[in-house]
Amino acid sequence: MIIKNNWLYTDLGNAKVENYPALYHGWSGRVFDPRYIIVHYTAGSQISSTINWFAFTPRKYGQTSAHIAIGEDGRVVQFVAFNDFAWHAGAKWNGLTNMNWYSIGIELVNVGFLRSGFPIPQERQLSAVHPNEKTARVWETYPQAQVDALIEVGRLLRKAYPSIVDVLGHSDVAPGSSLDPGPAFPMEQVRHDIFSITPPPTTLPWKQAITEWARTRGYDGPDPE
Ligand SMILES: [Zn+2]
C-alpha cells in the first residue's frame, strides 16, 4: 500500500484500497492536526458490520466513524480521508480538547471481551486484567495478519504525516468509558514497530498487558505482574 491524496492505494498507486466513504465525518471551521493514531476494537467479529455501520446506516445518535478498519485477516478498508476528521474519540486528553481533532482512528475487528452473544474460539482467548479495571476478563487476541496490517498502515501514516508521533489506545484517552483495544492488544510491539518507541516499562500500564500470545510470537517484554 501507499498513501496518495490522503487515501490508501495499492502498491502501484493505480487504485484505492477498498473504501466506503463514512456518513459522518468532518468538522467545520477547523484544520485537522493529526498527532496520534488511536486504536479501537469494533466489539464485533465481522468487518461487514463495521462497513454497514459507518457507511450505510443513517442515524440520529451514535454518529461515529473511523479513518480505517482492519479485519482479522488483514483486510484494510478506508472510510475517511486522512486529512479529514473521523468521529471516534471525542474525549479530552493531555490538554487537548477533543481527540477527534488530533488523531487518526483505526478500528480493529475484534470482539473485545467474552460476553453473551460474542463467542471467542478457545485458542484466541486470553484472560487478563485491563489496566483500568480490577478483575480479569477473557479477551480476544489479535491475529498476526491484523497486527501486521496495522503496523504497515501506521508506518505509512507516520511517513506521510510527520506530525503523528505516537499510538494510543481508546481507553488511554477515555479511561472512564472505553476498554478498547484491551489487554490482548500488543501495544508495546506496535508502538515500537511504528515509531521505534521503547518506553520505560515501569511507567506504562501496558506492562500488565504483555500477553501469552505476544510471547508465543517471540516478542520480548516484561512479565505480567
Ligand atoms: Zn473505541
Image (tube, rainbow, N blue to C red):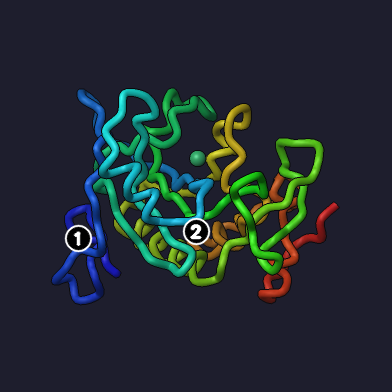
Whether residue 108 is visible: yes
Q: Residue furthest left?
A: 14
The amino acid type of the residue labelled 1 equals: Lys
Asked whether disc 2 touches disc 1, contact meaning CB atoms under 8 Å apart, the reply is no
- Position of residue 169 relative to residue 212, above or below, is above
Rendering quarter of residue 47: bottom left
Label 1 SS: strand
From the viewer's perspective, tell me whether residue 145 is left or right of residue 224: left
Residue highlighted by disc 2: 195
Residue drawn at x 68%, y 71% as measured from the top left: 219
- Position of residue 45 relative to residue 145, above or below, is above
Does mark 1's beta carbon lie closer than 8 Å to ligand 1?
Answer: no
Q: Nearer the viewer, mark 2 or mark 1?
A: 1
Tell me residue 43's x, y (percent). Answer: 53, 46
Whether residue 214 is visible: no
Residue drawn at x 75%, y 66% as measured from the top left: 212
Q: Which mark is residue 47?
A: none
Residue drawn at x 55%, y 60% as measured from the top left: 190
- Position of residue 99 relative to residue 192, above or below, is above
Label 2 SS: helix
Residue 154 or 95: which is nearer the viewer?
154
Tell me residue 80's x, y (percent). Answer: 27, 46
Rendering quarter of residue 56: top left
Residue highlighted by disc 1: 4
In three-dimensional space, the C-alpha distance between marks 2 and 1, rounded to whole angstroms, equals 21 Å
The amino acid type of the residue labelled 2 equals: Phe
- Position of residue 60 relative to residue 209, above or below, is above
Rendering quarter of residue 187: bottom right
